[in-house]
Image (spheres, rainbow, N blue to C red):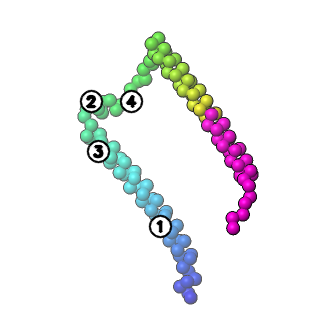
Amino acid sequence: MSQRDGFASGFFFGAIFGSVVGGVLGAVVASRSSSELEAEVEEQLSPSQTEAKKPLRRRHMKASETDSMEMETARRSLEDKIAQLNATIDEVRQQLGNVNSNSGQVINERPLTKDT
């Protein structure tokens, strides 16, 4: 009986201790492998790719009239599609509402017959 008394507390202590140690080891291994992986990728890149990886200054793009017309056309197209979807959703809701209301009436209007 003395072995059973300390089992629960030992089990919980072992689980907590194991999770803490596992978490610390996992964090250490992950940080080392990520730094090694970055170094390995940098070695494999050609010089032009490493230069391209460096942060560049942001360029401000000016929208031309054709770009703004394309954006407007795309916006209108999306608005039309949204309107079509909303109309279809309304139709389906009405159909389901009719089905649900009719099914309730059908259940109530069935004649009660006894099969013998």
According to the image, label 4 marks what residue? 55
- Residue 5 placed where, x, y %? 58, 83
Q: Are marks 3 and 4 in contact (CB under 8 Å)?
A: no
Within-10-Å neighbours for mark 2: few <14, some 14–19, many 20+: few
Within-10-Å neighbours for mark 1: few <14, some 14–19, many 20+: few
- Residue 58 placed where, x, y %? 43, 23
What whole-number distance in Å separates the C-alpha atoms at marks 1 and 3? 32 Å
- Residue 32 placed where, x, y %? 36, 51
According to the image, label 3 marks what residue? 40
According to the image, label 2 marks what residue? 48
Q: Residue lying furthest top in this view? A: 65
- Earlier-in-chain disc, 3 versus 4: 3
- Earlier-in-chain disc, 3 versus 2: 3
- Earlier-in-chain disc, 1 versus 2: 1
What whole-number distance in Å separates the C-alpha atoms at marks 1 and 2? 47 Å
Residue 52: mark:
none
